[in-house]
Amino acid sequence: MFENNKICQLLNIKYPIIQGGMAGISESQLVSAVSNAGGLGTIGSGLMPVSWLEEEIKKTRELTKNPFAINLFLQNPKIEELVKVIIKNRVEIVFTGGGNPLPLFPYFQAAGIKIIPVVPSPRLAKKMEENGADGVVVEGLEAGGHIGQNTTLCLIPQAKSLLKNILLIAAGGIYDGKTAAAAFLLGADGIQMGTRFLASIECKISESYKKKIIEATADDIDVVLRFTGHPLRVIKNQWSEEMKKLEERGAFPEEIKAEKIAGSLGGEDVEGIPLLSGLSAAGIKEIKNCQEIIAEIVKEIENSFKVI
Ligand SMILES: Cc1cc2nc3c(=O)[nH]c(=O)nc-3n(C[C@H](O)[C@H](O)[C@H](O)COP(=O)(O)O)c2cc1C
């Protein structure tokens, strides 16, 4: 089905299905499972230390021979050192999130590393193209974690109409073959999923967190921290209620500590930590392994196009 897909050609993968970087959560075990299943796994470096990233690159290479990527969270204070580690270790593909990636472009371009920023608007997608990005991910507000203001349904065709030379990957609310097929129909060249892979066997979050995802209904999912300028989509719990209270009493954004929000593997506690998750959680009913997830989606995309 995807023999002529341009994302597959650009990234040297079998299926144009990308596991979005998830800060501190998507590490070697998940990343290699996705890459071994024919998609593209992405290490989410988040606010993790430089040594963690170097170690995860090494471990991922031991677990897969296929390509994988790094997602750089641009708010990491050690960003320059992280860039050096990526270049030194010759990782071929970098995604960026959480800020302006343009100052990093020259370094990656000089090293021959493909750069694919994640952006929340058609305007920023165009800006990435003008500055020489190899592709761009537009992420709709259905997504888990930090979100923008546009929906995936509107972002894909609007970004597509502006882009002339680079490929478009869609993210936010995609979790099965039908939602993926819709993204392709709207003009996406590839898709990126986070929440679907959180509920995978290989993902290292706790079983309690996974259970929360597969049991969540649309009413259980909320957006908090709008007052900080960095809204965050989560499953409701004690932590999110506390954040709502902080907002109600007019807290300063500075009172929210970044390290509390950046994903972490945590323990079995599902009340005291932010349970980052997209709206797609309400449609995800089973924990499966990455091979099953990807194979099922590919098959369902094929069937969807047959129906059309
Ligand atoms: C737990 C979690 C952590 C995330 N961390 C990051 C991150 O560090 N950098 C980033 O660019 N995107 C991050 N994202 C966004 C994902 O990479 C992906 O684009 C998003 O999950 C897609 O939407 P979906 O959740 O509807 O599949 C995160 C998402 C989740 C659910």
Image: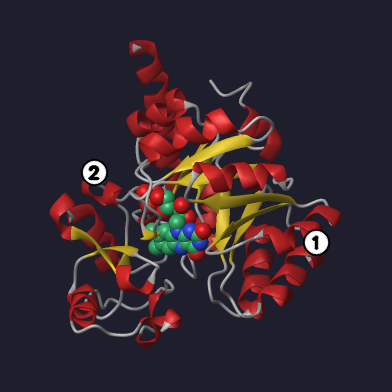
Residue 93 appears in the picture as rendered: yes
Q: Is residue 79 left or right of residue 149?
A: right
Q: How is the image coloured?
A: secondary structure
The amino acid beneath tag 1 is: Tyr
Which x, y percent locates residue 145?
Answer: 38, 62
Mark 1 or mark 2, whichever is nearer to me: 1
Vertical relation: 211 (above or below) 191: below
Q: Secondary structure at mark 1?
A: helix
Q: Is residue 62 left or right of residue 222?
A: right
State the residue in front, 106 or 121: 121
User: Which residue does the numbered mark 1 point to in the structure image?
Assistant: 107
Cα–Cα span, label 1 and label 2: 40 Å
User: Which residue does the numbered mark 2 point to in the structure image?
Assistant: 283
Instruction: Give me the residue at 35% from left, 12% from top.
Output: 308
State the residue in front, 31 or 219: 219
View quadrant of ligand 1: bottom left
Task: Give the number of the disc on residue 288.
Answer: none
Q: In this figure, what is the number of numbered marks?
A: 2
Which x, y percent locates residue 229?
Answer: 39, 69
Q: Secondary structure at mark 2?
A: helix
